[in-house]
C-alpha cells in the first residue's frame, strides 16, 4: 500500500513540476503515473550502474556529478515514456533537483512505522 502511495505522490510531484517548469511537459495524469514508475525503475536499475562507472568523476567533483546522473535518468525517462517531454539537459537538471525536493516534502507526510 505504501508503494502505491509513494508512486502516486511522485506522480503528483511530476504533474506539479510540469505545470511550473516550461521546459517539462506531461500529457495526462496517467502519463505522470507511468513517469513515476519508470523513474523508480531507472533509479533502481540504471542509476547504481552509472554511479559505479562514473565513480572517479564523482569523487573528483565531490559528488556534484550525481546531479548530472539524475538529469540523465530524467532524459532516459523522456525517451521511454511518450507524452513526457524534457527540452534540454538543463531543464532535466532543474526538474530532477526540484523533484527530489518536492518528493521529500510529500513523502514526509507518510507516517513511518
Image: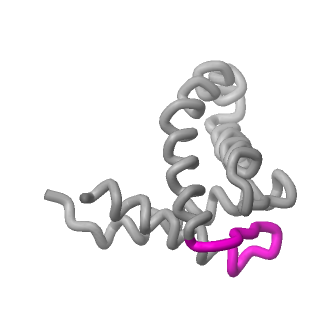
Q: Which residues lie in the magenta part?
A: 18-29
**Is 15 contained in the magenta span?**
no
On screen, residue 105 above or below 3: below
As drawn, the residue found furthest toward the left would be: 113
Does residue 102 appear to the left or right of 50 in the view shown? left
Residue 28, position in %: x, y?
64, 73
Does residue 99 appear to the left or right of 104 in the view shown? right
Residue 53, position in %: x, y?
65, 19
Residue 52 versus residue 15: which sits nearer the camera? 15
**Is 28 contained in the magenta span?**
yes
On screen, residue 54 above or below 113: above
In the figure, residue 108 lies in which quadrant?
Answer: bottom left
Residue 62 versus residue 40: which sits nearer the camera? 40
In the figure, residue 106 lies in which quadrant?
Answer: bottom left
Q: How many marks?
A: 0
As drawn, the residue found furthest toward the right would be: 88
Q: Residue at point 64% right, 56% down?
A: 96
Does residue 59 appear anywhere in the picture? yes
Q: Residue at point 32% right, 54% down?
A: 3
Specify the quadrant that holds the N terminus. Answer: bottom left
Specify the quadrant that holds the C terminus. Answer: bottom left
Does residue 64 appear anywhere in the picture? no
Does residue 67 appear to the left or right of 34 in the view shown? right
Q: Residue at point 51% right, 72% down?
A: 12
Residue 61, position in %: x, y?
71, 34
Amino acid at each position: 500500500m505504501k508503494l502505491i502511495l509513494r508512486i502516486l505522490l511522485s506522480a503528483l510531484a511530476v504533474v506539479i513540476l510540469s505545470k511550473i517548469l516550461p521546459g517539462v511537459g506531461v500529457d495526462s495524469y496517467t502519463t505522470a503515473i507511468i513517469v513515476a514508475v519508470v523513474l523508480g525503475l531507472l533509479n533502481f536499475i540504471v542509476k547504481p550502474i552509472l554511479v559505479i562507472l562514473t565513480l572517479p568523476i564523482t569523487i573528483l567533483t565531490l559528488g556534484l556529478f550525481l546531479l548530472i546522473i539524475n538529469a540523465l535518468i530524467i532524459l532516459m525517462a523522456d525517451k521511454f515514456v511518450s507524452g513526457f517531454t524534457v527540452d534540454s539537459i538543463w531543464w532535466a537538471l532543474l526538474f530532477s533537483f526540484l523533484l527530489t525536493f518536492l518528493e521529500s516534502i510529500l513523502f514526509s507526510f507518510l507516517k513511518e512505522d
